[in-house]
Image (spheres, rainbow, N blue to C red):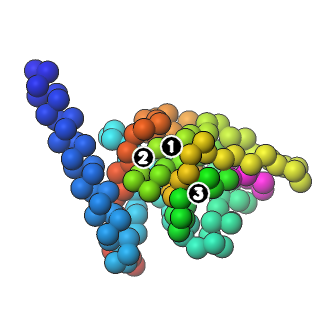
Amino acid sequence: MYFIFVFMKMAWVAAASLIFILFLVNLTLGYDVNAVSFGGESLVFVEMAKTPDERSRGLMQREGLLDGTGMLFIFEFEERHGFWMKNMEFPIDIIWLDRDGVVVDVAYNVLPCGGDICPVYEPALPAKYVLEVASGEARALDAELGVRAVFVQSRSGQ
């Protein structure tokens, strides 16, 4: 029984790695990420923030997120991308992923900031992708340090 479990785990890791490689290749061929999973059965459907304007605006001025949804920020380079909660209406979890899609940091239950001076939340390590989800979703998705994300995608415009 143990060997079956180990084999299934290895098959899942291989499949996740292949999907991620296809994600990297297809991102440059006009494909968009539609959802992200962290190895569990749960998916979070994402809105993309790829341009500087989209990343700057993020989730500001929104009333909330529907269950199972989030925003995926895609940056050109791996850096310690900082986020703040100015003009936010609801708490979120922030998940930073490196260029390989591995979780390098998570900030849980980050509260909105209504003032003029707001704290900036930065990851401990550089990240290329940042996923914002409703508060509590990171734990529900099993988005923990060292876990590799699986990106689900479709052709742009579909």
What residue sits right under mark 1 in the picture?
104
Q: Residue at x 34, y 78 (%)?
A: 29
- Is residue 59 visible in the rendered image? The answer is yes
- Is residue 158 visible in the rendered image? The answer is no
Q: Specify the quadrant of the image occupied by residue 106.
A: top right
Vertical side of 27 occupied by 86: above or below = above
Q: Which mark is residue 102?
A: 2
Q: Residue at x 42, y 38 (%)?
A: 146
Could you tell me residue 59's position as x and y percent?
Answer: 65, 58
CA gap between label 3 and label 1 equals 11 Å
Q: Residue at x 62, y 53 (%)?
A: 80
The mark nearer the N terminus, 3 or 1, is 3
**Of the residues tagged 3 and 2, which is closer to the observer?**
3
**Which residue occupies the extreme right position in the image?**
116
Task: Name the amino acid, label 3.
Answer: Glu
Mark 3 element type: strand
CA gap between label 1 and label 2 equals 6 Å
101 on left or right of 65:
left
Vertical side of 33 occupied by 100: above or below = above
Could you tell me residue 12's position as x and y percent?
Answer: 22, 42
Is residue 88 on the magenta stretch? Answer: yes
CA gap between label 3 and label 2 equals 14 Å
Number of marks in the rendered image: 3
What residue sits right under mark 3 in the picture?
79
**Magenta-tinted stretch:** 83-90
Vertical side of 81 occupied by 5: above or below = above
- The residue nearer to you, when weighing 37 against 125, is 125
Residues at marks 1 and 2 touching, judged by CB atoms closer than 8 Å:
yes
Mark 2 element type: loop
Please state, as top left, top right, bottom left or bottom right, where the N terminus lies in the image: top left
